[in-house]
């Protein structure tokens, strides 16, 4: 009962906040930036270490500029995510633009579901609005899905699931995603499923060790394994922040048929594409994530 009360209270408060125009919410974001960056100093040491190791050729002044810009983007992400509780389809369609969705539509038309490799860049919580832009899948049963790691707090977990279902997508816990997608496939339902594959692998996760941002890095390979076992095509969503409150996602082909490439190739291609995204604008990636907590040994060539 207490958890239900806490959920309803928090959900109600944030819904009221979300009714404010984004222009007002960005004023709140500016205040949050000062609080998070200068006063709380949220993970500033970690961000500084990550940036310095990833960009050893950049001067300290430039690294600090990237860090400040990252924290501004981070607090924008917070208020923009709250706004999902009260935003029209029309406004979202203007603010989150998608390109090359015909790649996904073509795979669906050919009878193949799609695994979408994604990352913590820009505002990843706005990406499920892709359902507003898919217009050429009529006549086929298509579910738009996303994989998530349940939060420790049941209240916040419910709230985030509510936010993530705003545009009709289905959220699957990481532990059950294969069974869920396999079941949908058996029922004749095509799926377009987003995987955030740039996180630090959990204990026991299979990985592919790669050189990424000048550092040996373990990449989750479970996404590729699932893609292969289900016969999905693989694409990458290249996120760009075009201006405050406006984003563009470009769909890029990774692999049309996983059976035609060697094991690990899909993961390697994703890592290369993600690195290109980050190098284009380092400030939009989630540098507060402890990505390199566990040392990684690259295999001998």
Image (cartoon, rainbow, N blue to C red):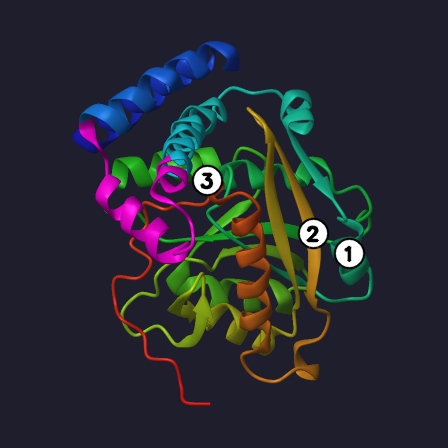
- The residue drawn where x is 59% and y is 44% is 239
* Of the two numbered discs 3 and 2 in the rendering, the one whose residue sits closer to the viewer: 3
Front one among 241 and 65: 65
Q: CA distance from mark 3 to mark 2?
A: 21 Å
* Of the two numbered discs 3 and 1 in the rendering, the one whose residue sits closer to the viewer: 3
**Residues at marks 2 and 1 touching, judged by CB atoms closer than 8 Å:** yes
Q: CA distance from mark 3 to mark 1?
A: 28 Å
Secondary-structure class at tag 2: strand
Q: Would residue 1 be seen by someone viewing this image from the given angle? A: no
Counting residues from the N terminus, which is met first, the one under dot 3 or under dot 1?
1
**Which residue is denoted by mark 3 in the rendering?**
283
Secondary-structure class at tag 3: helix
**Residue 232 lies in the magenta stretch:** no
Left or right of 266: which side holds 63?
left
In the rendered view, tell whether residue 18 sits above or below residue 42: above
- The residue drawn where x is 60% and y is 69% is 269
Q: CA distance from mark 2 to mark 1?
A: 7 Å
Front one among 192 and 263: 263
Q: Which mark is residue 298?
A: none
Left or right of 37: which side holds 226?
right
Left or right of 122: which side holds 246?
right
Mark 1 crowdedness (10 Å alpha carbons): few <14, some 14-19, many ≥20 = some
Q: Which residue ends up furthest to the bottom in the rendered image?
A: 301
Counting residues from the N terminus, which is met first, the one under dot 2 or under dot 1?
1
- The residue drawn where x is 65% and y is 69% is 232
Counting residues from the N terminus, which is met first, the one under dot 3 or under dot 2?
2
Q: Position of residue 108 (x, y in %)?
A: 76, 59
Provide the residue span drawn in magenta.
40-64
Quarter of the image with the N terminus is: top left
**Which residue is denoted by mark 2 in the rendering?**
251
Q: Position of residue 20 (x, y in %)?
A: 47, 10
**Residues at marks 3 and 1 touching, judged by CB atoms closer than 8 Å:** no
């Amino acid at each position: 009962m207490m958890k239900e009360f806490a959920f309803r209270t928090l959900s109600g408060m944030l819904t009221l906040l979300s009714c404010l125009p984004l222009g007002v919410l960005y004023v709140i974001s500016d205040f949050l930036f000062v609080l998070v960056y200068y006063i709380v100093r949220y993970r500033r040491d970690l961000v500084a270490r990550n940036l310095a190791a990833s960009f050893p050729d950049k001067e300290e002044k430039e690294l600090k500029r990237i860090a400040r810009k990252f924290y501004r983007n981070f607090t924008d992400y917070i208020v923009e995510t709250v706004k999902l509780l009260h935003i029209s389809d029309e406004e979202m369609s203007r603010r989150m633009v998608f390109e090359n969705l015909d790649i996904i539509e073509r795979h669906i038309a050919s009878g193949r579901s799609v695994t979408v490799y994604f990352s913590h860049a820009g505002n990843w919580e706005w990406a499920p609005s892709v359902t507003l832009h898919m217009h050429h899948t009529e006549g086929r049963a298509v579910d738009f899905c996303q994989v998530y790691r349940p939060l420790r707090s049941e209240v916040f977990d419910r709230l985030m699931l509510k936010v993530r279902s705003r545009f009709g997508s289905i959220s699957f816990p990481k532990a059950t995603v294969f069974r869920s997608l396999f079941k949908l496939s058996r029922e004749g339902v095509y799926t377009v499923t987003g995987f955030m594959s740039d996180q630090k692998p959990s204990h026991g996760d299979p990985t592919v060790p790669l050189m990424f941002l000048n550092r040996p890095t373990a990449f989750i390979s479970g996404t590729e394994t699932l893609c292969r076992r289900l016969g999905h095509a693989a694409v990458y969503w290249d996120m760009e922040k075009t201006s405050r409150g406006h984003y563009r996602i470009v769909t890029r082909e990774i692999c049309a048929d996983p059976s035609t490439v060697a094991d690990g190739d899909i993961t390697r291609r994703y890592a290369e594409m993600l690195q290109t995204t980050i190098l284009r604008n380092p400030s939009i990636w989630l540098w507060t994530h402890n990505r390199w907590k566990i040392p990684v040994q690259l295999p001998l060539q």
